Image: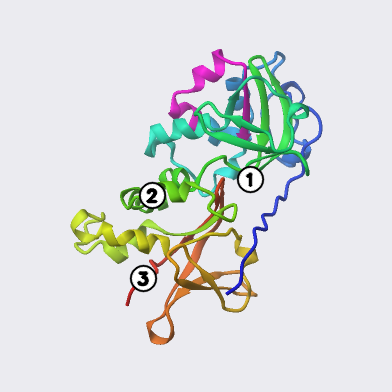
Amino acid sequence: MIDLATRFRRGLALGAGLLALALVTAGCDAFTDKDLGDSNPQTPTIAQYIQEVRVLSSLEAAVDEAGLAGTLENDGPFTVFAPVDEAFSPALNPSLNRQVTQKVVEDHAVSGAVASGQLSDGQVVETLSGDSLTIGTADGVTVNRATVTNADAEASNGVVHVVDNLLIDAVDRATLTPRFTIFARLVKEAGLESALRSPGANDGRTIFAPTNEALLNAFDANNNGSIESFEIDLDNFAPILQHHVLDSVFLAADVPTSPTSVETLEGTDLTVERDENTGTVTVAFGEGDAAVSATVETADIVVDNGVIHGIDVVLPLYF
């Protein structure tokens, strides 16, 4: 048994200078080769800023679906941590749950206009939804597991800091991600929502989330495209879900290239391995002919409380 330590890689450096719309160009350090939209001769509102900067189009869609465009246009002042489009990969569908979308958007905003130079290491700020964000300043400015890549875009009703990751926990991420909606529903029905929102004992969790297709293949006995109550025993399903979760965080590139045993929340062991040539990660349970192996199809979905890896097979707990 070995412990895989958290080794998150942040590939983008803190952008220098102000990102005011009047000065934004395609050559801005954090957005090389990106067209950030037309300049605006006047200081924009936060809502206008999000609308004008093209690499914030996914955030704009979420703001619109949440019904918060008017708030970011007329109210404030606010400080908004605005994730770029790449942070939404794999793509979210904000229309899957408008209430959750509203919470997620509000989790990217705090009351008051706070410049990056006013933030302090270890500072905890409350979001508009009532959740909290933890600020770091030791190596640039970070917010939870996201890095501020461009700071201090002035708006008429606040300030915008552009970040490279979504500020979202694993349950909300799964709820709004089309390929994980069944997983998210079963987590809630099995009473594990709180556990999969928390960081656990080791500052985060690694979740091997079976895709919708994997779950349907395993439990949709009548092949009608859904998992119904008679097809699954929720009293025994919580351990199966815990069997897919580790109480430590690692990215796909951190998985050893030789078979390595890791302990799950359920107390059982999984064997993880990364192919040295392709980088493909497999997760297996059991031995010999009874072993079941899953492949990570979607790797490194970073969330506030760890990372999600989408897998193509449900790993059974009992044989």
Q: Is residue 157 magenta?
A: no
Give the mark nearer the N terminus: 3 vs 2.
2
User: Looking at the image, is 221 positioned above or below residue 19?
Assistant: below
Q: Residues within 10 Å of mark 1 (few under 14, many from 20)?
A: many
Q: Which residue corresponds to mark 2?
A: 184
Q: Nearer the viewer, residue 307 or 42?
A: 307
Q: Which residue corresponds to mark 3?
A: 316
Position in image of residue 3 (x %, y %): 61, 67
Question: Which residue lies at the image location 65% right of the left edge and 17% below the top edge?
Answer: 44
Question: Which residue lies at the image location 27% right of the left edge and 63% below the top edge?
Answer: 219
Position in image of residue 164 (x %, y %): 65, 42
The image quarter in which residue 43 lies: top right
The residue range painted magenta reads 62-82
Position in image of residue 89 (x %, y %): 54, 48
The image quarter in which residue 238 lies: bottom left
Q: What residue type is disc 3 on? A: Pro
Q: Is residue 81 magenta?
A: yes
